[in-house]
Amino acid sequence: MPTVNPTRMELTRLKVKLATATRGHKLLKDKRDELMRQFLDLVRVNKTLREKVEQELQDANKNFVLARSTMSSEAVEVAFMAPKQEVSVDVDTKNVMSVDIPQFTTHTRTSDANDIYSYGFAFTSSDLDDAVQSLAELQDDMLKLAEVEKSCQLMAAEIEKTRRRVNALEHVMIPEYQKNIKYITMKLDENERSTQIRLMKVKDMMLEDKHHYKEKLEEPVTE
């Protein structure tokens, strides 16, 4: 049996709570569905980007292997001893359905982003140039992949949290409110019927007292 006070004030309060919970349940379901749609879009983008990045990494590694086969270890170390370019990353966030997903922006130390070779071309192979160039081109895709994967993780966590809230409202709170409202309504109806019966009883007693129904009924019938 519900442990609530069966009063009209409590009934009104529970009806307001039920209406709020029902609206919240619908909004959360809409939010969950929209998050799922955007999450699936991001998953598809993530799959495409990952395949592209893995292929580009393989190509860059092949170029490095080729360069290493034509150059000595000392020459490769000397070529990369003094880096010419430097890249910094600024991290910002964008709010999507109450989820703060990251946004990465890169900045290079020099004004020319293509100024990436830290060595002269006289004593290095073209394969090394191709490897450095492929890694430079890969940078934006890798950052985008990191951004998308982190966004997928954050959205998945938000979807799970929203799903738990929807289930709590749908299977716990709303049924509890409905059960309590039904109980209070039944109690109030029962009390109203009892009051009605008592009033009718009092009315009969008052009429009996005023018109002496019992005395008239007890008087002997004269022929």
Image (tube, helix red, strand yellow):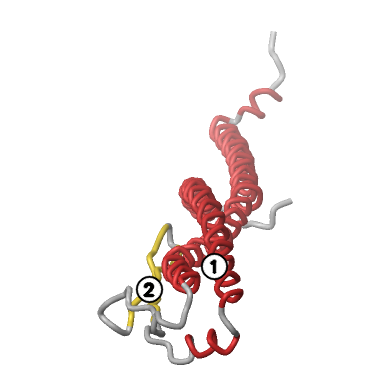
- Rendered residue at 47%/79% (across/down): 124
Q: The residue under label 2 is which amino acid type? A: Asp
- Rendered residue at 29%/83% (across/down): 110
Against 24, residue 202 (above or below) is above
Q: Residue 208 location, x and y as percent?
A: 59, 32
**Residue 4's image quarter?**
bottom right
Q: Tell me the element at label 1.
A: helix
Tell me how far mark 1 sits from mark 2, CA to CA. Answer: 34 Å
* Residue 217 vs residue 61, the one in the foreground: 61
- Rendered residue at 27%/77% (across/down): 112
Q: Tell me the element at label 2.
A: strand
Q: The residue under label 1 is which amino acid type? A: Asn
Question: Which disc, if any, is residue 92?
Answer: 2
Task: Assess disc 1: are there few (<14), some (14-19) or many (≥20) residues with their C-alpha within 10 Å of its C-alpha.
Answer: many
* Residue 210 vs residue 162, the one in the foreground: 162
* Residue 181 vs residue 43, the one in the foreground: 43
| Residue 38 seen | yes
Side (left or right) of 120 relative to 193: left
Task: Assess disc 2: are there few (<14), some (14-19) or many (≥20) residues with their C-alpha within 10 Å of its C-alpha.
Answer: few
If you read the primary sequence from the N terminus, does the residue marked by circle 1 or circle 2 appear first? 1
Against 188, residue 5 (above or below) is below
- Locate the C terminus by quadrant: top right
* Residue 176 vs residue 198, the one in the foreground: 176
Provide the residue designation for mark 1. Answer: 63
Question: Which disc, if any, is residue 173?
Answer: none
Q: Residue 6 location, x and y as percent?
A: 61, 52
| Residue 19 seen | no
Side (left or right) of 88 relative to 161: left
Side (left or right) of 110 relative to 139: left
C-beta proximity under 8 Å, tags 1 and 2:
no
